[in-house]
Amino acid sequence: MFEDIRRAFESLLNGEVPATERRGMLSEMRETLVRARLAVDDLRTGVVATRERLVQEQQELATISRRKTLAEGIGDTETVTVAARFESHQAERVLVLDRKLEAQEGELALVEREVDEMKAQFRAASAGVGSGLREGGIGS
């Protein structure tokens, strides 16, 4: 997701960026980190929304199953048939939402790790790593 940014950080950390361009590059990286944090917030919001919808759909499935069981108890075969069809559709919906939630949580974890790595690289770049200041230069 952030491959271009990661390469820019690597170039900066490895001292491949001229000193005259470091400040501008650091400024761009700071802005990118802000956007990345906003993206993480959006992903978190999506996870929460999916989790809430999954709970609602699971409750609906429980209600449908309960109604089907009641219909079976009184021998209402027509209602049992209809309820079984709805139960099947609802179970599939719950399964899909469960998979969606799992994928969103995985994506969120991945992006959070990437952002944490970028923060660490930004701190190192801001501290002058790769600038020659700490590598046998003035700061040694």
Image (tube, grey):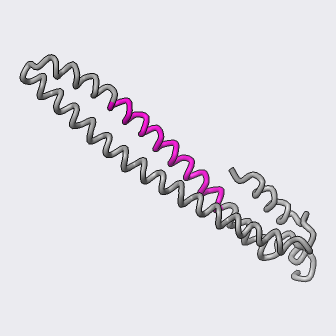
Q: Which of the 4 image quadrants contains residue 23?
A: bottom right
For the C terminus, give its image quadrant: bottom right
Q: Which residue: 89% across, 66% down?
A: 15
Above/below status of 31 relative to 10: below
Instruction: Say if the magenta span includes residue 132.
Output: no
Which stretch appears magenta? 90-116
Q: Main secondary structure of the magenta part?
A: helix
Query: Measured from the top left, where is residue 132 in percent x and y?
Result: 91, 74
Residue at position x 74%, y 65% from top? 121
Q: Residue at x 40, y 34 (%)?
A: 95
Q: Position of residue 106 (x, y in %)?
A: 54, 46
Q: Observer-nearest residue: 16 or 81?
A: 81
Q: Is residue 113 magenta?
A: yes
Q: Is the residue 4 above or below the residue 139 in the image?
A: above
Looking at the picture, does residue 20 appear above or below residue 17? below
Residue positioned 12% across, 25% down in the render: 71
